Image (cartoon, rainbow, N blue to C red):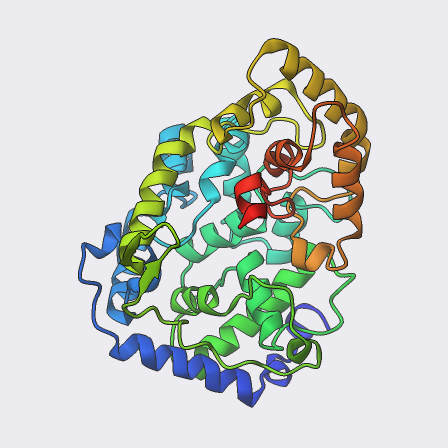
């Protein structure tokens, strides 16, 4: 079943292939982004030519950086640069891993040297980096970054497997069956063969295929149709088109302007919350409470910081041990049982209600705990 014995052709279905071909055709005929596309507020503005150009630029810039011959020269600034979307032009969110990845540069070089060593079987390399039992070789080097680096270094051989890709493949009923109890290395071997077969059938490349998942990964809980196994066709908004955002306040602007405004806001706020590394994923530390002031938590004096930190740590640390750092709310806990228990425990702490609890816990489990402040809940 696993590895080279997996038959990817059995995983393809006509409905999914039709959807993917339709998306490629829309991207093929879509006009180029009217703005400087390398700085576009949302890469979904790009067309197929721009996606291909991004691949050429990134591979030319970074394939050599991650080659075994050059890893000894890899420095902190280079890896931090690669993690930023404006440089890798493909993946958001990798930059939040920077603190952990660069804490030990010699160890990082050793990990990457192992990863790109084609003289060793892929499964052997991945099992060393992400052992089936025990801690990872290097904190922060998970499947999203591992497969992203493989894609940039060997673009025709390795596809990307991250949460977005997994959700999209499951949404299309392309996710391989029977791999629930497999190791990370075994899962990637199987999925990579599937990605190679998909790219071949669609007459595209692995970079572009990974781009398609952004349109298809569901962000909402499954509907009854999804639960019955139907594949919804992409909504008309899958490929953005000119439209406007109208708010009760009277604000009336185009969606492109709204996205650009949101991006500017996020860039300004990033340094004060998201950029501050989480050095203890299974424990609530004082810094996790203090940085929430940037999110308007009103935990804004020493007494409150101590009170909230001690209360949340006492209530939540033991529960977080059960929830993987990269847990995804839709796939890890679709019935919200662990979510409910964690939030219930958090609000038992003095001076802690849902807004403060989620602003702290979001740092610990970013794909599992969304920020639910009064603005969001009121809306």
Q: Residue at x 24, y 69 (%)?
A: 49
Name the spot of residue 7 as percent of width and height, x first. 64, 80
Name the spot of residue 246 as percent of width and height, x first. 34, 59
Height in image: 115 above or below 19? above
| Quarter in which the N terminus is drawn | bottom right
Q: Quadrant of residue 278?
A: top right
Height in image: 285 above or below 7? above
Counting every numbered tag in the picture gives 0
Farthest residue toward the bottom? 14
- Taking depth in this image into account, of 230 and 71 the one nearest to the observer is 230
Query: Position of 205 compared to 350: left or right?
Result: left
- Taking depth in this image into account, of 237 and 319 the one nearest to the observer is 237
Answer whether residue 138 is visible to the viewer in this image: no
Answer whether residue 21 is visible to the viewer in this image: yes
Farthest residue toward the top? 302
Q: Quadrant of residue 137?
A: top right
Height in image: 32 above or below 336? below
Name the spot of residue 181 as percent of width and height, x first. 79, 61
Name the spot of residue 55 as percent of width and height, x first. 31, 59
Query: Position of 53 compared to 324: left or right?
Result: left
Q: Residue at x 59, y 64 (%)?
A: 167
């Amino acid at each position: 079943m696993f590895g080279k014995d997996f038959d990817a052709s059995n995983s393809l279905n006509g409905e999914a292939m039709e959807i993917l071909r339709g998306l490629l055709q829309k991207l093929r005929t879509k006009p180029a982004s009217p703005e400087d596309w390398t700085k576009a507020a949302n890469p979904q503005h790009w067309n197929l030519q721009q996606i291909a150009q991004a691949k050429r630029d990134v591979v030319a810039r970074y394939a050599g950086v991650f080659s075994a011959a050059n890893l000894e020269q890899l420095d902190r600034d280079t890896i931090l640069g690669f993690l930023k979307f404006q440089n890798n032009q493909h993946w958001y969110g990798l930059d939040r891993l920077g603190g952990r990845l660069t804490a030990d540069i010699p160890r990082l070089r050793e990990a990457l040297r192992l990863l790109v060593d084609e003289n060793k079987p892929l499964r052997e390399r991945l099992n060393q980096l992400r052992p089936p039992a025990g801690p990872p070789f290097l904190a922060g080097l998970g499947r999203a970054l591992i497969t992203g680096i493989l894609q940039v270094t060997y673009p025709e051989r390795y596809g990307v497997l991250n949460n977005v890709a997994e959700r999209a493949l499951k949404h299309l009923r392309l996710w391989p069956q029977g791999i629930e109890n497999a190791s990370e290395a075994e899962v990637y071997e199987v999925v990579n063969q599937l990605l190679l077969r998909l790219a071949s059938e669609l007459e595209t490349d692995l970079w572009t295929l990974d781009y398609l998942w952004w349109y298809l990964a569901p962000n909402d809980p499954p509907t009854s149709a999804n639960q019955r196994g139907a594949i919804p066709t992409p909504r008309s908004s899958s490929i953005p088109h000119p439209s406007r955002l109208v708010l009760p306040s009277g604000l009336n602007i185009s969606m492109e302007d709204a996205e650009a405004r949101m991006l500017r806001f996020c860039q300004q706020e990033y340094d004060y919350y998201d950029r501050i590394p989480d050095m203890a994923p299974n424990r609530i530390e004082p810094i996790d409470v203090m940085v929430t002031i940037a999110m308007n938590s009103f935990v804004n004096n020493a007494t409150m910081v101590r009170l909230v930190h001690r209360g949340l740590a006492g209530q939540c640390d033991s529960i977080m041990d059960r929830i993987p750092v990269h847990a995804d709310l839709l796939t890890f806990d679709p019935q919200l049982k662990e979510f409910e228990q964690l939030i219930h425990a958090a609000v038992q702490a003095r001076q802690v209600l849902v807004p403060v609890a989620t602003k702290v816990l979001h740092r610990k489990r970013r794909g599992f705990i969304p920020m639910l402040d009064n603005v969001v809940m009121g809306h």
